Amino acid sequence: MRRHPFGPWSFVPGALLTAFALVVLVGGVDVTGWNLSWVGPAVLIAAGLTLLLAARGRRDPHLEVPAAPEDEPAATTAELDAEDGD
């Protein structure tokens, strides 16, 4: 299994949610009296911004796969999997 790069777009919300949950769980904070009417719209705005950023696409020209030369047959999926298994 290959290691993927660090993703701050996933880590930061997860860390914030975990910290909030720990404060409520351990700290005995009463959240029943809070006015949380802004949470729903904030989540929708964050999701929309995330989708817009993801739609931009991240094209790195260094990651493009070069075309196989015409005189040499392209590698099969089994051959590529055998190379990755090293």
Image (cartoon, rainbow, N blue to C red):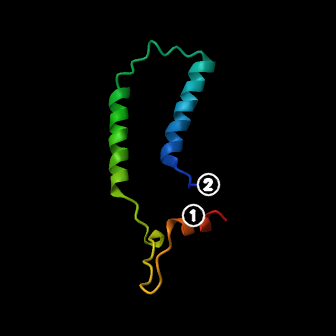
Question: Which residue is at 46% across, 12% downward?
Answer: 32
Residues at discs 2 and 1 in contact (Cβ within 8 Å): no
Calculate the distance from the C-alpha at mark 2 to the C-alpha at mark 1: 12 Å
Q: Residue furthest bottom?
A: 71
Q: For residue 81, which numbered disc appears in the image?
A: 1
Against 19, residue 85 (above or below) is below
Which label number is shown at residue 66?
none
> Could you tell me residue 61's position as x and y percent?
43, 71
Given the image, on which type of amino acid does mark 2 rest? Answer: Met
- What residue is at 52 percent from the left and 31 percent from the top? 17
Instruction: Determine crowd level at label 1: few under 14, some 14-19, many 20+ residues with C-alpha closer than 10 A.
Output: few
Q: Secondary structure at mark 2?
A: loop
6 left or right of 59? right
Q: Is 38 left or right of 2, judged from the image as shown?
A: left
Observer-side mark, 2 or 1, equals 1
- Measured from the top left, where is residue 74 in percent x and y? 47, 76
Amino acid on which disc 1 is placed: Asp
* Vertical order, 28 against 48 (above or below): above
Q: Which quadrant of the figure contains the N terminus?
A: bottom right
Viewport quadrant of the C terminus: bottom right
Between 86 and 57, the one lying in front of the other is 86
Q: Residue at x 44, y 12 (%)?
A: 33
Q: Is residue 6 left or right of residue 37?
A: right
Residue 68 occupies which quadrant of the picture? bottom left
What x and y, as percent, mark residue 28?
59, 15
The residue labelled by disc 2 is 1
Write down the quadrant of residue 37 in the picture.
Answer: top left
What percent of the width, then of the height, locates residue 84? 60, 64
Q: Is residue 86 above or below residue 75?
A: above
Closer to the chain start, of discs 2 and 1, is 2
SS for callout 1: helix
Q: Which residue: 50% across, 70% down?
A: 76
